[in-house]
Image (cartoon, rainbow, N blue to C red):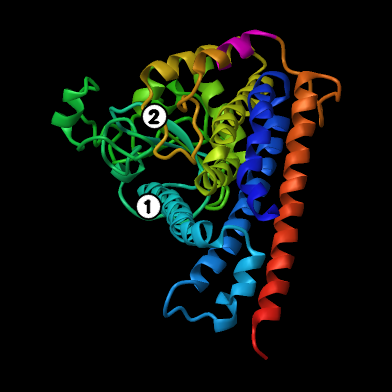
Amino acid sequence: MFVFLPLVLPLTAWPVARLAEQHLHPRTATRLLTVLAVVLALCSTVCLGLVMVVGTAQLPGNPLPDGWSDPEVRAAVPYDEVVGKAAIPALCAVVAACARTLWRHARVRRQAHRALTGLPDTEVAVLPDAVPYAYALPGGRRGGSPADARPGGGRTGPPIDGRPGGGRTGPRASARRGGGPAVPHRHGRPGGELTDGGRTGGGRPGEGARRGRAGRRARGPRGGRVVVSTALLDRLGAAERRALFAHERAHLDARHDRFLLAVQLAARANPFLRPLRTAVAYTAERWADEEAARAIGSRRTVARAIGTAALVSRGTPVSTLAGLAAPGPVPRRVAALLGPAPAVRTWPPAFTSVGLAAWGAAAGTAVSAMSSANSAVTMVLILHAATPL
């Protein structure tokens, strides 16, 4: 019966998912919740695969040894007639959902990198676009057109249900959404760079200085870049632009895309882990908020930048990339920045609500790991005994 426990033990992590947002440092909460989600998802997937083996053995014409479908094997596995066969489509759905998530993440990254082809490898890439957006793009290969770097791979409009894009590009499409006409050559060429001198590449002298000296540090193709549109920069003051760039740099330096992708895959593997995915999406933004506030020395400025960007920004092209105005509880982020900085702890005190929730989630994760290991060993022994030599 241990084979079924990892499928429901993610429920033990629900209390800490909510309490960690409120009582833990965002860095600690992000790392803790990601580890819990990944381990619980792996354990539940392993057990689902073990049950599927038994269900597959009952199907006519399967390539498995005949001994795996003997009555003795079915007697050793509980509810094999129903659960074993139901696990087949369930595991196929998990694999398909995870593969689709990975494909979309890789596709959006490739499109964004292709959009920056030919631009210098500076840290900030400014694209002339009437659609306001900004996000942290991890390092990778490049090649393509600037329209591909828009959220949605060249289509204007906010992401719908996490899918990139909501409409067609062009002056008419932008005007219909109230964003004004498209500006494909606002700075003299499609796409711009903030360089050491503050000038936007191919643009008017001093135009980049008005947006701040954002590209002082050069990064290689693998270092990641901050992608931002001129429409968003035009709506931010000088101090708010510094907060924006510091926030996105924090996402790149801490590789928050990896945390977001990991919990996204975990939630696809087990729907009970969706609260952890939502919590990590919030704590990763809070982590970057705190790093930005420390870098520029003003929590209020970061809060003002978040509030301004949230009113106009179209968000990120995919949920596994991070941005200043990513979807989520923006008022809670602003309120947290207007208060004192959170205390840094590696683990919460045991006799507190968040401490008890953390230990409960850790215990559930440990039981899940032991149950999946026990089930795997037991299944291997049973199938080995049933396999003719």
Residue 340: name its quadrant: top right
Q: Nearer the viewer, residue 95 or 322?
A: 95
Counting residues from the start of the chain, the first of labels 2 and 1 encountered is 1
Q: Which residue is mark 2?
A: 133
State the residue at coordinates (59%, 10%): 335
Image quadrant in which the N terminus is located: bottom right
Q: Are marks 2 and 1 in contact (CB under 8 Å)?
A: no
Q: Give percent across and percent down for residue 106.
A: 44, 53
Q: Amino acid at mark 1?
A: Arg
Q: Main secondary structure of the magenta part?
A: helix
From the top left corner, tell me how far across and down residue 14 is, in percent: 63, 30
x, y percentage for residue 376? Answer: 69, 64
Nearer the observer, 325 or 385: 385
- Image-based side of 180 in relation to 39, left or right: left
User: What is the CA distance from the residue labelled 2 to the residue labelled 1?
Assistant: 18 Å
For disc 1, the marked residue is: 114
Q: Which residue is drawn at the image coordinates 76% and 38% (left, top)?
A: 362
- Magenta-drawn stretch contains 336: yes
Magenta residue span: 333-339
> Is-magenta flag for residue 301?
no
Q: Amino acid at mark 2?
A: Tyr
Left or right, 285 with respect to 105, comes to right
Q: Dot 2 lies on which element?
A: loop
Instruction: Give 162 or 193, whichever is nearer the viewer.
Output: 162
Q: In the orientation shown, which residue stands out farthest toward the left?
A: 172
